Image (cartoon, rainbow, N blue to C red):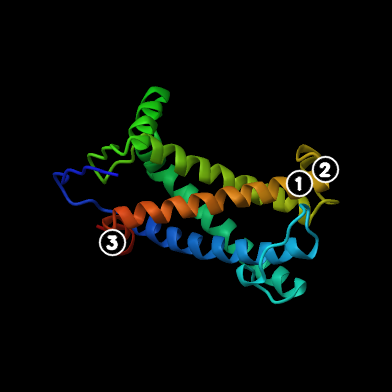
Amino acid sequence: MTTTFNRPSKPILVPLYVRISHWFNAIAVIVLIMSGLKIYNASPIFDFLIPKELTLGGWLGGALLWHFAFMWLLVANGLIYLVLNFSTGRIWKKFFPLSPKAFMQEAFDTLRGKLSHQDLSKYNTIQKVAYLSTITDIIILVLSGLAIWKSVQFPVLRELMGGFDNARIVHFVAMSYIVFFIIIHLLMVAMVPKTLLMMTKGR
């Protein structure tokens, strides 16, 4: 795949809060996935189990402790990220506008291995859709997790999810999307390692 880049006219600066929230989010999501898989194995909703090497917690009680602890980190970190993005206007600058036509063209260029990303300081349409869908997915994860954890206390939320058992399915599917996003994200970072420096050094 050939991806072209032009050097921007001025240094690309990544706000400190974006970098901190990115790494906190990465830690929280990884722990939540691994502990969640251990919880899944204790009462699977599908006809398969997850290899124990990919799980965290050792036993159900331990997995629940890990899951609930890092759930709070994910929620707090996500709220801070969203509040700062909206208050600074970054959400509109980085993720909008969105163009279906541009998305289809860039998707076609990606399949041909000719996606051109002219400026690393700006997200292309595929990146915008990927990040916005991931933010939405995390919100769904939190809501479905709440419907599972506090099913009696939040009956309306539980019913919106289609009931307790369906909420578990929604939670699992949303988690699977996050895993898919992480894999693609790591592949893209490997292709453009400068983005890793941006997220660590800030420029």
Q: Nearer the viewer, residue 118 or 91?
A: 118
Q: Label 2, on which residue? A: 163
Nearest the viewer among 126 and 10 is 126
Label pair 2/1, CB-CB below 8 angstroms = yes
Does residue 65 appear left or right of residue 27 in this picture?
A: right
Residue type at tag 2: Gly
Horizontal side of 113 relative to 104 (left or right) equals left
- The residue lying toward the viewer, choosing from 46 and 129, is 46
**If the image is split into quadrants, where does the C terminus sit?**
bottom left
Report the residue marked by disc 3. 197
Q: Give the residue pinned by disc 1.
A: 167
Q: Position of residue 175 (x, y in %)?
A: 62, 52
Say which label, 1 or 3, has the lower sequence index.
Answer: 1
Residue drawn 48% across the image and 40% down it: 132
Identify the image quadrant of the N terminus: top left
Q: Viewed as shown, does residue 23 lie left or right of 59?
A: left
Task: Check disc 3 and report its element: helix, strand or loop.
Answer: helix
* SS for callout 1: helix
Which residue lies at the image location 70% right of the left edge and 77% below the top edge?
Answer: 58
What kind of residue is marked 3? Leu
Image vertical order of residue 199 relative to residue 164, above or below: below
Q: Amino acid at mark 1?
A: Ala
Q: Position of residue 21 (x, y in %)?
A: 45, 59
Please say whether residue 178 is visible from this viewpoint: yes
